[in-house]
Amino acid sequence: MTAPESPADSSDGAAGQGELEDLEEHLLRERPSLTQAEVAEQAGLPLEVAQKIRRLLGFAQADPDDRAFTQADVRAYTLTRDLIELGILSEERQEGLVRTWGRSFARLAEWQIALVADIALEAGIEEPSGLLELADEIMPKVEELQSFVWRRHLVTAATRLLTTTGDDPGSMQQAVCFVDIVGYTSRSRTLSDRELVGWLEDFETAALDIVVEHEGRIIKNIGDELLIVADSATAAADIALELTRRGADEDDDFPAVRAGVAYGDVVIRLGDVFGPVVNIASRLTSVARPGTVLVDLGMYSAITGRSGDDDDHHDPRSGDSPYRLRRLRRVSVKGYSRLKAWALQPA
């Protein structure tokens, strides 16, 4: 048998619940008052479809009697119904697209709340009312900026699609580059959590500057590894060489890295890239020595215009090429027993 709750305990619990409800109302701009069934009915969606979309977005299913929804949910589900009727959210597209939305915004929200918490800590704000005022000041600006960044990226993506030849918009020729930090595990053991995060963020920021300067794109980071794509083989070569050059400079805080680059047809889906070219780039990175860049036959041919069958083991640069490619013995990696590979170096 548990002891009866003291008045003080009851008061503290009620206050905490009230603060959470105030925060929820503040961020949602309305006190939740609807069940999910009521939301689905008002939006004109079958309840099972609404539940599926909520699950794909990464939210736990609400209790049938839980009044956890607002008119904003009705509006969101109404828009979803419209997209389904237009064929944008067809059955085969729903899961991938909605799941990607949920995953992307969940990560963004986690980062933004952590940012607000850090700012509040630095400013000495402890009271809930102060946090709400801070959120009021920050969130509208962040929301507007997110929309601007999204639209700008839409322009870039649309331009790339319209200027790409080929019948399949989901497939195109790309250079794919993986960049891996050398000695990440040992270095991470010497750093606190905050120091490790700061170190990785500095690495990603510096890498982003280099990638964007050479008209490439960072698709994602996978722990201590970056996945980069570029429309041209030379752009990817320049990115990989600059990243390894920075890592080899003892006076530069940029960590030592190694890279693998492959070129050819890739499948583009939901902002990610797939296919053998991606696998080959990853495999080459795994066998590259620190500070080196390995490239596959596709990259070799795109850079030199040669087939790769008639070169010697020490292929000097030809003409005024800014690169030197040294052929290696065939590489055996997972899934590829005799992979042609070259070491890429600046001329």
Image: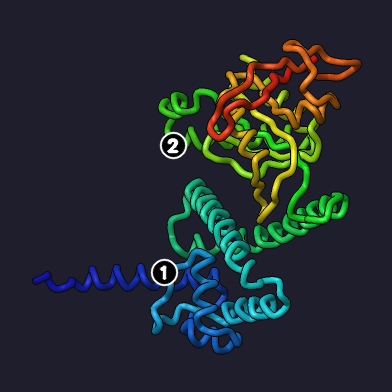
Residue found at x 71% / y 71%:
88
Secondary structure under badge 1?
Answer: helix
Label 1 crowding class (10 Å Cα cut-off): few <14, some 14-19, many 20+?
A: some
Residue farthest along the right direction in this orientation: 319
Residue 93 relative to residue 1: left or right:
right
Q: Nearer the viewer, residue 118 or 248?
A: 248
The answer to which image quadrant residue 346 occupies is top right
Give the position of the N terminus as an image quadrant.
bottom left
Residue type, mark 1 in image: Glu
Compared with 167, 20 (above or below) is below
Q: Residue at x 48, y 85 (%)?
A: 37
Q: Residues within 10 Å of mark 2 (few under 14, many from 20)?
A: few
Q: Look at mark 2 in the image and give the residue it sits on.
A: 193
Q: Which of 33 and 189 is in front in this view?
A: 189
Q: Quadrant of the C terminus?
A: top right
Which label is found at residue 19?
1
